[in-house]
Image (tube, grey):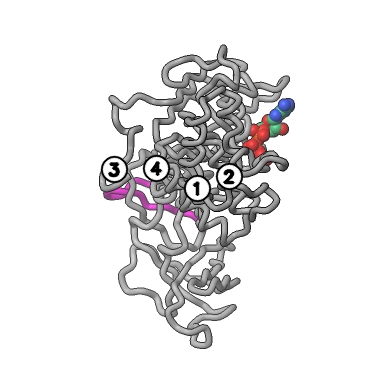
């Protein structure tokens, strides 16, 4: 995507590739997708993220044509896709199981859809060669799937899905079968291939980090609704709700009541605890319930009370999660609220300055937290 910022969703002239218009999907009385309207743009890498049963797969299956909306319309390139059968859509789906043909070679697997479409032989040869090159599988062309590693099979599936140059590729847990290390490498490969082909990718994943790594936008879903669809950075830094803040990454959520003060709010959250301060643009009435979401890496932990921190709270270390380069301290305040603080381990573990039961101070600036409506 080079130096230019790729944000077609902010461009009023950009034409969406996919448009959901008031789409509802019901199974009997059960509402799986609840009146959703949103756009996905050409060349986007769009990730659907959310807890099990929130409707991610249903969303994909409607795009692929395996399910039809109960209400509303889905447009692809401005055209209603409802009357177009799945095999006639410029959409392909790559399944987690890859569904490769075991008796066919890698070359034949990739060529399969092209042959079925009666593409001339020389064109098939050229296209398969191009796909093998793209996915770095040239030397595996003659092998059968069982003679390939998991990562190679994943690339074959990708090559086969992209061979017919679909406008849209749907990927259901594409890296689910790979182990953690290979999964990471393959994420970058996937992004690279997506960028090279310019195909729009919609991916379903359970793995938040994966979604945050590969996607141009992440849609966080809950109970058949997209709660927030935004860039990974904004999802992380500017979640629109306690649900999204809590779903993505580690966070402490302090619930209290807000009182307007200066260019933000004073937040009272527990008897005997100091008033917190947060700058914010959101509109809250006096004494309105609110949540303050604070990422652990924005909370400093010290033995002494910091001199002029906007927010400083005292507590006792309840738990320490040691993650090699990082430590996360779980600190319990007198009212029982637990606040997390994460620090980089620049010293060796033996010199770690805090341990269980230590009385410590936690502090953060008035811009460190995100203030959210209840
Ligand atoms: P997971 O992460 O577990 O795959 P998901 O977010 O993909 O979950 P969906 O598969 O889209 O969830 O399912 C959404 C809801 O719709 C679930 O509660 C599921 O039980 C229900 N559902 C899906 N397909 C059907 C069906 N054919 N008949 C009845 N209910 C269905």
Look at 31% across and 33% down and name the residue there.
10
Q: Earlier in the sequence, mark 3 or mark 1?
A: 3
Side of 280 where 271 appears, left or right: right
Q: Earlier in the sequence, mark 2 or mark 1?
A: 1
What distance separates the C-alpha of mark 2 from that of mark 1? Answer: 8 Å
Q: Which residues are magenta?
A: 257-270
Vertical order, 280 against 326 (above or below): above
Residue marked by disc 2: 156
Q: Picture quarter containing residue 87?
A: top right
Q: Are marks 4 and 2 in contact (CB under 8 Å)?
A: no
Query: Closer to the camera: disc 3 or disc 1?
Result: 1
Q: Which mark is residue 196?
A: 4
Q: Earlier in the sequence, mark 4 or mark 2?
A: 2
Residue marked by disc 1: 135
Mark 2, ligand 1, within 8 Å: the answer is: no
Look at 36% across and 38% down and name the residue there.
283
What distance separates the C-alpha of mark 4 from that of mark 2? Answer: 17 Å
Q: Earlier in the sequence, mark 1 or mark 4?
A: 1
Classify the position of ligand 1 by quadrant: top left, top right, bottom left or bottom right. top right
**Secondary structure found at label 4:** helix
Q: Which mark is residue 5?
A: 3
């Amino acid at each position: 995507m080079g130096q230019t910022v790729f944000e077609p969703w902010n461009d009023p002239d950009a034409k969406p590739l996919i448009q959901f218009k008031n789409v509802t999907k019901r199974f009997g009385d059960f509402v799986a997708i609840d009146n959703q309207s949103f756009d996905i743009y050409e060349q986007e890498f769009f990730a659907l993220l959310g807890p099990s049963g929130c409707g991610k797969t249903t969303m994909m299956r409607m795009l692929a044509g395996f399910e039809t909306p109960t209400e509303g319309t889905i447009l692809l390139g401005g055209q209603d896709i409802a009357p177009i059968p799945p095999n006639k859509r410029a959409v392909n789906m790559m399944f987690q199981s890859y569904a490769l043909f075991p008796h066919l070679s890698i070359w034949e697997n990739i060529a399969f859809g092209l042959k079925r479409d009666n593409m001339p032989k020389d064109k098939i040869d050229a296209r398969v060669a191009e796909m093998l090159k793209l996915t770095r599988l040239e030397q595996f062309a003659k092998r059968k799937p069982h003679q390939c590693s998991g990562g190679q099979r994943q690339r074959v599936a990708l090559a086969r899905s992209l061979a017919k140059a679909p406008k849209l590729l749907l990927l259901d847990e594409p890296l689910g079968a790979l182990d953690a290390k290979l999964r990471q490498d393959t994420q970058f490969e996937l992004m690279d291939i997506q960028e090279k082909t310019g195909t729009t990718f919609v991916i379903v994943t359970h793995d938040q980090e994966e979604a945050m790594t590969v996607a141009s936008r992440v849609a966080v879903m809950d109970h058949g609704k997209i709660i927030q669809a935004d860039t990974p950075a904004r999802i992380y830094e500017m979640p629109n709700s306690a649900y999204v803040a809590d779903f993505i990454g580690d966070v402490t959520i302090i619930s209290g009541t807000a009182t307007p003060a200066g260019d933000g709010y004073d937040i009272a959250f527990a008897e005997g605890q100091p008033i917190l301060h947060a700058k914010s643009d959101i509109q809250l009435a006096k004494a309105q319930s609110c949540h303050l979401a604070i990422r652990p890496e924005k909370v400093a932990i010290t033995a002494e009370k910091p001199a002029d921190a906007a927010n400083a709270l005292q507590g006792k270390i309840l738990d320490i999660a040691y993650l090699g380069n990082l430590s996360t301290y779980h600190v319990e305040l007198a009212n029982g609220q637990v606040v997390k603080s994460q620090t980089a381990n620049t010293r060796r573990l033996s010199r770690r300055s805090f341990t269980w039961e230590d009385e410590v101070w936690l502090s953060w600036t008035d811009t460190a937290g995100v203030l959210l409506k209840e």
